Image: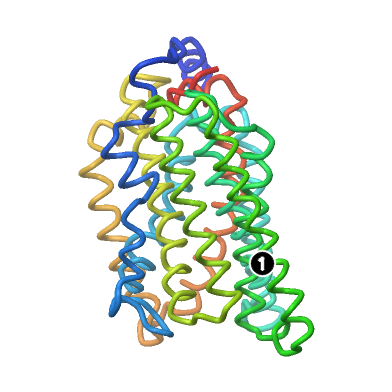
Amino acid sequence: MEDQGRAAAVTEPAPQPGAGRAWIVSPAFDLLFLANVAWPLLLLPGVSSSADTAIDFWQVYFVTLPHRWVTLLLVATDPDRRGTRGPWLVGIAVLAALAVAGAYLGTGAFLCLALVDYVWNAWHFASQHAGVLRIYARNVGGGVPWLERWALRAFVTYGALRAAGWLTGALEANESQLVVLRALDLAVLVIPLALLVTNLPGLSAARAGKLAHLVSVCALYSGFVLSLSFGWARGIVAFAAAGSLFHAVEYLAVVTHYARRRETVGGEGAFRTLARNWVLFLGAYVLVLGSFGAWASTPDSGLFVIWQGLNLWAAFVHYAYDGMIWKLRRPETAAALGVNS
């Protein structure tokens, strides 16, 4: 079945550039779920405070949590995404389980893995945004490839790591260090400016989707860096929530796009059955997992520590798997996502 799936994906006709390729799915879908153009609503007065936002609960349990676990579901049910990497994927899951279990047995907590999780997650956020931008670039062109691939990653990762420094206060305690840090913040903002400027030559309606996604990502993380630089607490909370929501919704949108195509592209498998009823399945999946996660995360559930460990394990597996199963340089992956070769 795996060989059949790969063959079907590879022989799928490559999409042709031209009219209709400005959007990965459609204008409404791309703007709402890939460019996430509604994220500025989190900046409205009353939506966020200096501690949280009005959507934190729903975001954590009904968006962020499902987006992490859906990767495991996808790999377990879809032979096309596993390909010939089955043993490697199993090995990664086992190593992640040993790391999480070993950390808890050795220290009685998971704090020693918190730094690994934070840094890896920051790079993961950045890589996903760059990956979606790359899909647009492969279809409609524009921009400078290395800049969109590596500079965007560096910019998003910097924002996340800068937030860690703000939270601890270690870098901002010294006034001279703070001056240098603010200068660095402003220097980093050259990256989004360069990304936007290099996409202006030859700009046309065919690049509308790409430009919308790029502007949205750049505006969010520019606002985040500036809020951190000037200590605007409410803005930091709002931009952080927007970044997490953006990332999770964007990923679920990519998986949904893939599921819609898997109804006719690729080999047979359990995931194709799910794909035929994807919207219904996704709604039930989000509702059930989110509700269970909200209950299991309370100390009274009796599963608090176990659930913490499982989520940390799922996070590590999610980061690792996503770096393997969505590589556009693989012809079968590009074809499955409807991306130009």
Amino acid found under the numbered disc labelled 1? Asp
Residue at figure coordinates x 56%, y 36% from the top left: 325
Quadrant placement of the C terminus? top right
The residue under label 1 is 185
Instruction: Judge left or right: residue 60 versus residue 320.
Output: left
Q: Position of residue 99 (x, y in %)?
A: 68, 64
Q: Position of residue 303 (x, y in %)?
A: 42, 77
Residue at figure coordinates x 30%, y 77% from the top left: 45
Q: Depth check: 65 or 159 in front?
A: 159
Q: Position of residue 195 (x, y in %)?
A: 59, 43
Using the image, determine if residue 139 lies above or below residue 66. above
Instruction: Judge left or right: residue 147 versus residue 304.
Output: right
Using the image, determine if residue 240 lies above or below residue 262. below
Quick one: SS at disc 1?
helix
Residue at figure coordinates x 45%, y 75% from the top left: 235
Instruction: Judge left or right: residue 30 versus residue 11.
Output: left
Q: Depth check: 42 or 116 in front?
A: 42
Quadrant in the picture for residue 298:
bottom left
Residue at figure coordinates x 60%, y 57% from the top left: 316
Instruction: Judge left or right: residue 124 versus residue 187.
Output: left
Looking at this rendering, what residue extends furthest in the right direction? Answer: 176
Query: Few, some or many C-alpha atoms within 10 Å of disc 1 (few <14, some 14-19, many ≥20)?
Result: many
